[in-house]
Image: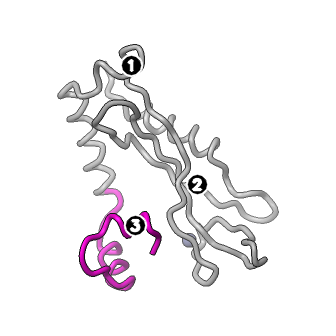
């Protein structure tokens, strides 16, 4: 477990099977709806006003690697060769988050897609554009 994750967990670290069992019972679409509802409430409560830069609330987009393995893979894995020359399977997403003054709100995330054949896996720029489109699509109509 990476040092970054270890800082998030207090007490006994759960076994990977326990984490997998817990996560497989969660419906990602339900989590997405809860997140969208949270963002709507933040907008309604005017949390996104008087931002840090010229009065604007600013958001940044960056890539985040979620996990990697040289042994386990799935059809959606991105693939690369590691330093030892082994094929490494991993998942990566782009995340859009407000920066500057608190609260730092995650506005959305988009998984980068793998490509079949000789084409390269999708990059952060393509995923970032799709994420912006998705966030704009979910803007409330005024
Ligand atoms: Zn995978």
Earlier residue among tags 3 and 2: 3
Between 84 and 25, the residue placed more toward the observer is: 84
Quarter that holds the N terminus: bottom left
Residue at 64% x, 65% y: name it. Answer: 78
Quadrant housing residue 117: bottom right
* Number of residue marks: 3
Q: Residues within 10 Å of mark 1 (few under 14, many from 20)?
A: few
Of tags 3 and 2, the one toward the viewer is: 3
Using the numbered discs, state the Cα–Cα distance from disc 1 to disc 3 in whole angstroms: 32 Å
Q: Tell me: residue 100, above or below residue 94.
A: above
Is the CB of mark 1 within 8 Å of ligand 1?
Answer: no
Disc 1, SS: loop
Earlier residue among tags 1 and 2: 1
Q: Residues within 10 Å of mark 3 (few under 14, many from 20)?
A: few
- Residue 112, numbered circle: 2
Quadrant housing residue 128: top right
Disc 3, SS: helix
Q: Which range is magenta?
A: 1-29
Using the numbered discs, state the Cα–Cα distance from disc 3 to disc 2 in whole angstroms: 21 Å
The residue that disc 1 covers is 56
Disc 2, SS: loop
Q: Are the two marked residues, 1 and 2, in contact with CB atoms closer than 8 angstroms?
A: no
Earlier residue among tags 1 and 3: 3
Asked whether 65 falls inside the magenta stretch, the response is: no
């Amino acid at each position: 477990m990476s040092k970054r994750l270890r800082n998030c967990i207090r007490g006994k670290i759960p076994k990977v099977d326990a984490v997998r069992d817990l996560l497989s019972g969660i419906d990602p679409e339900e989590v997405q709806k809860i997140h969208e509802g949270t963002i709507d409430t933040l907008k309604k409560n005017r949390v996104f006003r008087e931002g840090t830069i010229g009065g604007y609330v600013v958001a940044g987009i960056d890539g985040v690697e979620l996990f990697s393995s040289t042994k386990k893979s799935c059809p959606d894995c991105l693939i690369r060769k590691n330093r030892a020359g082994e094929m490494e399977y991993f998942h990566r997403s782009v995340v859009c988050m407000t920066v500057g003054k608190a609260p730092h709100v995650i506005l959305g995330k988009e998984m980068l897609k793998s490509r079949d054949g000789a084409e390269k896996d999708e990059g952060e720029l393509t995923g970032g554009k799709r994420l912006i489109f998705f966030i704009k699509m979910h803007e409330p109509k005024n």
